[in-house]
Amino acid sequence: MRLSLLLLVFAVLGAVPAAAQPSDAVFTPYDALEWVEIVPGVTFAATHGDMMAEAHGKLIRFDAGVSTPVHTHTNAYHGVVIQGRVTNPYSDDEALREMGAGDYWYVPGGAPHRTACVSEEPCLFYTYGDAAWDVAVLED
């Protein structure tokens, strides 16, 4: 399972355009990441790129039980679950699919969705976007 997760993360990272990749080798320990609270219970830590301006990768932590309102992003993104159980249905999607460690999802730009950590443990996932990140809340 761990090997499958690593291969999936490498596959997503392999899709990163050259302009968004660092020019030198980089290693950042998890404990050295700079976490920023976006809303209560949701924190982001950039792995590369400026998420507000360009292609970027980030780790995202959700406290157990935290759910976002339905929202959209202008640009698409890819996600991989590392820990916990996550749901990310589109607003008209009746099938609530739970994703666990190693599971991948993709959200096209403009697609309404709601992200939630449905496990008793906090959730951690990695996302990659090939353009700037933004968010527009559609409903609470």
Image: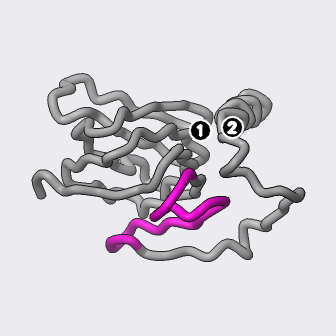
The mark closer to the camera, 2 or 1, is 2
Distance between mark 2 and mark 1 Cα atoms: 11 Å
Q: Is residue 54 magenta?
A: yes
Residue in the foreground of this view, choosing between 2 and 75:
75
Q: Are marks 2 and 1 in contact (CB under 8 Å)?
A: no
Residue type highlighted by circle 2: Val
138 is higher (above) or lower (below) than 91: below
Q: How many marks?
A: 2
Residue type highlighted by circle 1: Ala
Which residue is at 56% across, 64% downward? 50
Q: Is residue 13 magenta?
A: no
60 is higher (above) or lower (below) than 30: above
Residue in the foreground of this view, choosing between 140 and 16:
16
Q: Residues within 10 Å of mark 2 (few under 14, many from 20)?
A: many
Q: Which quadrant of the figure contains the N terminus? A: top right
Mark 2 or mark 1: which comes first in sequence? 2
Q: Which residues are magenta?
A: 38-55
For label 2, the SS is: helix
Q: Position of residue 18 (x, y in %)?
A: 72, 43
Q: Position of residue 60 (x, y in %)?
A: 51, 58
Image position of 28 (left or right of 116): right
Residue in the foreground of this view, choosing between 118 and 55:
55
121 is higher (above) or lower (below) than 28: above
For label 1, the SS is: loop
Give the residue pinned by disc 2: 9
Which residue is at 55% across, 42% downward? 81
